[in-house]
Amino acid sequence: MASIDPTQLSNWFQAYSDRLALYARQWLDAALADDVVQDVFLRMVSLRTQPSNIPAWLFRSVRNASLTQIRSRKRRRLHEEQRTTQQPAWFEPQPDEPISSGNVQSALELLPHEQREIVILKIWGNMTLQEVADIVEQPISTVFSRYRSALAALRRIMEKSNAK
Amino acid sequence: MQNEPQLTSVELEIEAAFGGLQPAKSFIDRDKLMFQAGQRSIHNRTWMWPITTALLTLALVFSLTLRTRPQPTERIQMTTDISNPSSQSIRQSEFSYLKIRNKVFTKGIDALPVQEQSSPANNEPLPTIMNELKFEDS
């Protein structure tokens, strides 16, 4: 396939930029997450041929770029500092939402990292289990097991928070 | 997808409930991104022609330096052997022909020499160019 054209880039950006930013924000603060997502889209322009699965490529690239950022000592210190400052919400608050977006964000933050990543990819990334397994480089059985565990944990957390 | 393990109905409900939430809008400037993307794509394309030109130039220089010297061509040059009497008589015949020709040009047809009758003892034909060349029948 030929390289991506501006119209395609715009469409992919419109469809996935928010989801990719959400995915990156489990590792990075909002501003850095946006930078990483922007760089990934620019890198896609430089590709000579389009990836066969563009959404999976986007999420995998954001993951790799985010982990590269977090591994840097300097960024790690900044990340720890930023966590104490107020960050924008992960989800758009909606009136009369069946479940509180703030509670969902809190519940996600309580999950182990490997479960949270899979939940975000599966639910908001619309990835299949196989695609998630390819992105996180784990067997599909492991991914499925972690996903079910994450859903059960989220359910418990939400029930507990609703009970309060 | 068909081979993927399936969730229970409860798990599917939870999945659907969470899926109803919209991720917050990123603060990425779309117009700035598109502008940078355009610049990057042009930058990728502008490098193609200089690289191609440089490669072709290198190939040309390489081929010119490695080009073999032209092979010496053989030329057959006819030379006259001075020691050979027949070649001497050819030159003399040519000289007398040119002399006669010039006389005719300057003084007219009457300047042609009168052919002397050869003695019967001398049966040799008069020297002519054709005779002197002595083409042999194959």
Image (cartoon, rainbow, N blue to C red):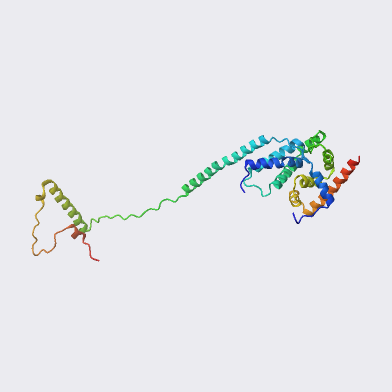
Find the residue positioned furthest to the top.
Answer: A85
Residue A58: tell me if it is visible: yes
Residue visible at 11% across and 47% down in the picture: B107
Q: Position of residue B15 (x, y in %)?
A: 81, 47
Residue visible at 72% across and 46% down in the picture: A60
Residue visible at 56% across and 43% down in the picture: B48
- Residue B131, quarter of picture: bottom left
Q: Is residue B96 above or below residue B20?
A: below
Residue visible at 48% across and 46% down in the picture: B60
- Residue A13, quarter of picture: top right
For the C terminus of chain A, which image quadrant? top right
- Residue B43, quarter of picture: top right
Q: Left of A45 or right of it: where is B117?
A: left
Q: Position of residue B39 (x, y in %)?
A: 61, 37
**In the image shown, does A5 or B97 lie closer to the viewer?**
A5
Q: Left of A133 or right of it: where is B136?
A: left
